[in-house]
Image: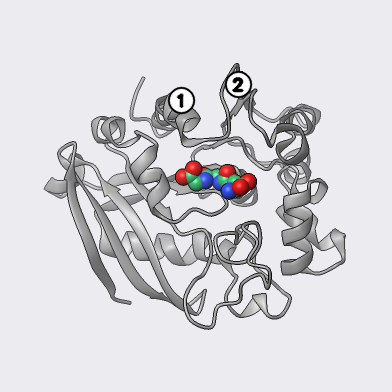
Amino acid sequence: MSIENISTNKVFDGWHKQYNHQSQTLNCKMRFAIYLPPQAANGKKVPVMYWLSGLTCTDENFMQKASALKLAAELGIAIVAPDTSPRGEGVADDPEQAYDLGLGAGFYVNATQAPWNKHYQMYDYVVNELPGIIENHFPVNKQRVISGHSMGGHGALMIALRNPSLYQSATAFSPVSNPVNCPWGKKAFSAYLGADSKKWLQYDTCELIALAQQKIPMLVDQGENDNFLEEQLKPHSLVVAASSNHYPLSLNMRQGYDHSYYFIASFIETHLYFHAANLGLTE
Ligand SMILES: N[C@@H](CCC(=O)N[C@@H](CS)C(=O)NCC(=O)O)C(=O)O
């Protein structure tokens, strides 16, 4: 499967690059971004952090706004940022073009309902197709960690909980922790997965964390001044579900911080160091 390079920028002695490719899973052309640290230049294979962004984002928000690349370069971690939904001609969108359904709002699930099921298969794309492409085309090894923000925080934790042997660790900023019980999640899951809410549970972090058997280290950061805190994100439900199963999850509540990339930029280094330790890159 070929990929087409569409931008290349040197940054902190490594390279930020964007690619287009035809996705078999999503049935459309997709764009992703990769940051290759300097260690990847001399034949060495580096581990990968997959970053899943939130509502309205593309591959660009994290790479441009999170201030992650300097430390990724020092630690020798590649970062891959996919888009947040399928896109392009013929891809369904919300008839009202709301920001929380359709384009920019794939919720990292495999849609079963028409018209969404033709393209909205973001779970399979992130877990299977994209890592296959990355491992074929770039000097990376099979060690993966995963992180994300908001809708992407839900994606990162949920995907790690469902595939604990594929990821060394998972972290999230302001995750949608209990999508089956919040307005964003109910709206998206009823459209993509249908009215039967039992079918939503396979994608709910609180549900999965309470039942998980194989456990991997997890870290969550949450701003206390986040506008979406109580209605959409529900970090306390996550803590209750995790402790009911003695799951190794730490939640940091951060006084004064909001939902934006200013918050992510303030704590991204903590998340990179956390992953680096679980990848065996640091003491
Ligand atoms: N625009 C939406 C909120 C969307 C939003 O906050 N998106 C977050 C993720 S959930 C984001 O990362 N936005 C893009 C950015 O800040 O670069 C609203 O009006 O309520």
Q: Is residue 115 left or right of residue 194?
A: left
Amino acid at dot 2: Asn
| Left or right, 224 with reference to 234 | left
The answer to whether 87 appears left or right of 101 in the picture is left
Identify the residue position indicated by label 2 in the image. Answer: 252
The foreground one among 2 and 212 is: 2
Q: Which residue is mark 1?
A: 267
Percent from the top left, x then y, of residue 234?
Answer: 75, 34
Is 167 above or below relative to 117? above
Q: Secondary structure at mark 1?
A: helix
Residue at 46 percent of width and 30 percent of height: 262
The residue shown at (70%, 38%) is: 233
Residue type pointed to by label 1: Phe
Image coords of residue 272 (percent x, y): 40, 31
Residue 156 visible to an observer of this rendering: no
The quarter of the picture where residue 116 lies is bottom right
* Chain-order first, disc 1 or disc 2: 2
- Whole-angstrom CA distance, mark 1 to mark 2, is 10 Å
Please give the name of the residue rendered at 79% of the width and 46% of the height, measured from the top-left corner: 182
User: Is disc 1 in contact with disc 2, using a CB cutoff of under 8 Å?
Assistant: yes
Quadrant where the N terminus is found in the figure: bottom left
What residue do we see at 56% from left, 64% from top?
A: 122
